[in-house]
Image (cartoon, rainbow, N blue to C red):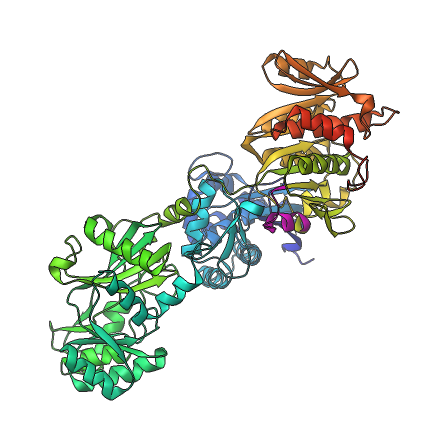
Amino acid sequence: MKKHDIVIERVTHLRGPSMWTYLPAIEAWVDIGDLEDFPSDKVPGLYERLESWLPGLIEHRCSPGVRGGFLQRLRRGTWPCHIMEHVCLELQDLAGMPGGFGRARETSKRGVYKVVVSAWHDEVAKASLTLGRDLVLAAIKDEPYDVEAAVEQLRDLIQEHCLGPSTACIVEAANERLIPAIRLNTGNLLQFGYGANARRIWTAETDNTGAIAETISRDKDLTKSLLESCGVPVPTGRAVTSVEDAWDAAEELGLPVVVKPIDGNHGRGVFTNLISREEVEAAYAVAIDEGSGVLVERFIRGDEHRLLIVGGKLAAAAKGRTASVTGDGRSTIAELIESQINADPRRGRAEDQPLNFIRLDSAARIEIARQGMTEHSIPDAGREVLIQRNGNVAFDCTDAVHPDVADVAATAARIVGLDIAGIDLVAQDISRPLQEQGGAIVEVNAGPGLLMHLKPAEGTPRQVGRDIVAHTFPPGDMARIPVIGISGTQGNASIARLIFWLLGLHGWRTGLACSDGLFVGRRQLRQGDCATFDDGRRLLLNREVQAAIIENDGIEIITDGLCYERCEVGIVTAIGWTEDLAEHDLLEADDLIKVYRTQIDVVLPTGSGVLNADDSRVADLAQYCDGAVIYYTLNPQSQVVTDHLTAGKRAVLVENGRLTLAEGTTKVALCEVAAIPAIGAGLEALRIQNVLATTAAAWALGLSTELIEAGLLSYGLNETALTAP
């Protein structure tokens, strides 16, 4: 190792909740070598360089818990890996991924640390780790570092790998409702929810968006004829078959006219306010290359507007503005476009910029020529030159929309058959009904972009992701199925199989991922050890599955995290050294507890944690459970259980040889323990504990006592059951 070096030895991608955080994260083992002897207060100028390069570090609160807290630590003295953690997060923030989680912790080897940072996408997080390491080294060695180049590199990765802003806002809104989201491809296709109750959304299209409706919306002529037949105001016009036919149509309609592709999108090939044969012919030549045919329509005077309709209601509206330059007597029109329009920071090619760059395309050249100039002309000082008549629809006007206009737009969406639609209309005043001002709907679009509403160039941002989530998932619907997570160091597979049997009797098509295989209903999908992240995720993606039982061993939690972000029931059976965790530098009992605590951390507020009261370390996990807690015990006199029942809570135990459900002072005795085949005549303590844990989970899920008793007594006696424990 070089002197004064920082080496990233290995990186683990934690795809789900782990001992560190609920969020996906990367855990890096970082060796700082002899820099262990050089905390920040021992490196001259380090504080000043970092503060100068990354002024946003003032917002990092760190352990002091106040603004500037990290800088306080930096000035007093802290180690390179801690600095690296904060630098990684700040670089991600500057690149457009704000917020996140970070930790830096020593290992048992001197100079080696675990650095953990949240990973909205693992490629971006890994790159930020490397760039953060390089920046910290440069600051320590007093060498130059190009912060902007590093941030730009991350921006490029975000643009390439991460969700676009339209999809991301829907995910954020789903998270607010505790609705899980799983990315299904490298694009913007996501599953929200689990199993049989899951829904799929692709940007602003849902699985309720019909293929026929989408096809209709792409055919502008068909869309217009359907709207017109239902009384929706649309511009008169027709499809044309040649450049001569286009001019004939223009003469029939009367100038000015609009020429556009019959199935184009994003405004490409659209020409408005055409007033001569030459303009119509030039527009036709471009429009025919953008689509499968061309429309010529009467020009509607007014401004462009985009109304977002979600579930039959107006969610947001934006208005377009023309783009012009003002001459200075020195610059060409092309130069003025760059300095006066494209220099606007709101414009760009990135997905988070609401306005696009103005291009000198054929439509712009026609507009400029109409004013007697070319792109090379130098307008007189003070002369205004119109460059673009349409586009630039990014100025919020939601509050100004007249109710009649909103109703017409919603009607248009229904006629085409879209549950989410972008309605393009032209009106001089959006606060007045269309009919009285000669306004009209010009297009109905499936899969509309949302950025103009999320981040308008001017006006109030609209939380349209919430509207889409509320439409897709009615109030109270979290699109979940019951997920039962089982962790600990004894009896996990046996408990999983028993619960699987009971839920099958209950009538749920249940999935099971455990160390004995992968099952859905009566089908075994995979053999061998399937207590893995990937196999558990297979159940959650399976739309046949009405409930999922997933076994998680300690190694899986350490190396992958849990495959679900929350669960209905979380079971922890025992905490012991049954797995070799030394290679993960987990050497103390507290380390082990943190691993298995993960299972209880993710229990839903409406769910239940099932804990073995006979293991004090497991029983203590109750404090971390957001939901209810059900203890199970072989010792009815357990002080933990006695106190729990005194508080009116629930426990499962054995009294007088019978399986007993206790809630406060109420007790319900079920069958004799000795009669349960899964326990057997030997009455082994472990087998009894397995049945108690199973019973507690079934009780938490609302299964009747009669079904629980019958299921326990019949398990293992039916040839279709999984092998008895």
Q: Residue at x 61, y 14 (%)?
A: 664
Q: In which quadrant is the C terminus drawn?
A: top right
Q: Quadrant of residue 702?
A: top right
Report the front residue among 86 and 541: 541
As drawn, 507 above or below 371 = above
As rendered, which of 263 and 159 lies closer to the eye? Answer: 263
Examine the image and state in which quarter residue 636 appears.
Answer: top right
Spot occupied by residue 294 in the image (x, y as percentages of width and height): 30, 79
Which quadrant holds residue 204? bottom left
Q: Is residue 487 above or below residue 371?
A: above
Determine if the magenta segment contains residue 717.
Answer: no
Residue for point 45% across, 36% down: 476
Q: Is residue 109 visible?
A: no
99 or 253: which is nearer to us?
253
| Total labels drawn | 0
Decide: is 237 above or below 567.
below
Regarding residue 542, the answer to whether it shows in the image is: yes
Residue 539 belongs to magenta span: yes
Q: Position of residue 312 (x, y in %)?
A: 32, 50
As rendered, which of 723 and 505 lies closer to the eye?
505
Q: Residue furthest right?
A: 682
* Rendered residue at 27%/83% (across/down): 284
Q: Residue furthest front?
A: 229
Q: Is residue 306 above or below residue 648?
A: below
Residue 429 x %, y %: 15, 57
Q: Where's residue 68, x and y in %?
A: 43, 40
Q: What are the residue bounds of the magenta stretch?
A: 535-547
Q: Quadrant of the N terminus?
A: bottom right
